[in-house]
């Protein structure tokens, strides 16, 4: 089942359950999918496109959550956090820092990256492998940490 089908099913379930927050988030995801389809870029949405849409939506919620927290608007921060959790349910399982470091070590051996100067060589290879499975900022920090050992 692709993302569009899953979203449509979940939309029906959220309507029946009268879950307003979930319904709102799913509608926004559905709108992003429809926007992509109408852009005319491709005939069929690939799994990479699905992940790109979901990570974009998750990133927006995460940034809004942080901004609301910094402004001491905990009421709005909690809403953004709840929306983020709903979106993350559609994303592949996110890796923790230890799992990311293991992948970085493995990829570093493949591309022979050993020092900070190898960052431009290592970072794209790691992001290609971990796309959708880990936050880009976290990966960047861990790659820099790995190369500075």
Image: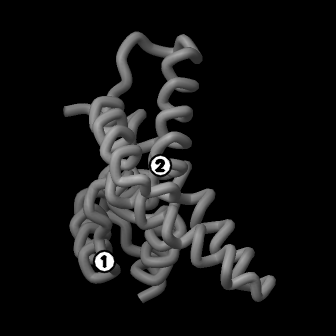
Q: Residue at x 51, y 58 (%)?
A: 21
13 or 116, which is in the foreground? 13
Is 7 located above or below residue 75 in the figure? above
- Disc 2 versus disc 1: distance between alpha carbons? 29 Å
148 or 129, which is in the foreground? 129
Q: How many marks?
A: 2
**Nearer the N terminus, badge 2 or badge 1?**
2
- Asked which colour scheme the image uses, the reply is one colour
State the SS at label 2.
helix
**Residue linked to disc 2:** 23
Q: Residue at x 59, y 70 (%)?
A: 79
State the SS at label 1.
loop
Q: Quadrant of residue 74?
A: bottom right
Residue 2: give x, y in percent of width and height.
Answer: 26, 32
One can see residue 118 in this view:
no
In this rendering, the label closer to the viewer, 2 or 1: 2
Q: Indicate the quadrant containing the N terminus: top left, top right, bottom left or bottom right.
A: top left
In the image, taking residue 59 as reference, residue 6 lies left or right, namely left
Query: Residue placed farthest to the right in the image?
Result: 71
Is 119 located above or below residue 34 in the figure? below
**Residue linked to disc 1:** 96
Disc 1 crowd, CA 10 A, few/some/many (<14, 14-19, 20+): few
Residue 142: give x, y in percent of width and height.
Answer: 44, 77
């Amino acid at each position: 089942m692709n993302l569009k089908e899953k979203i449509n099913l979940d939309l029906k379930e959220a309507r029946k359950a009268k879950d307003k927050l979930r319904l709102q988030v799913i509608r926004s995801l559905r709108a992003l999918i429809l926007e992509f389809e109408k852009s005319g870029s491709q005939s069929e949405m690939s799994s990479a496109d699905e992940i790109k849409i979901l990570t974009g939506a998750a990133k927006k919620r995460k940034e809004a959550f942080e901004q609301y927290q910094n402004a001491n608007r905990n009421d709005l921060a909690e809403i953004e956090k709840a929306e983020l959790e709903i979106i993350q349910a559609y994303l592949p399982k996110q890796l923790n820092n230890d799992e990311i470091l293991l992948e970085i070590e493995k990829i570093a051996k493949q591309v022979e990256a050993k020092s900070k100067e190898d960052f431009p060589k290592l970072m794209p290879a790691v992001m290609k492998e971990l796309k959708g499975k880990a936050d880009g900022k976290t990966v960047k920090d861990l790659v820099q940490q790995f190369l500075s050992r």
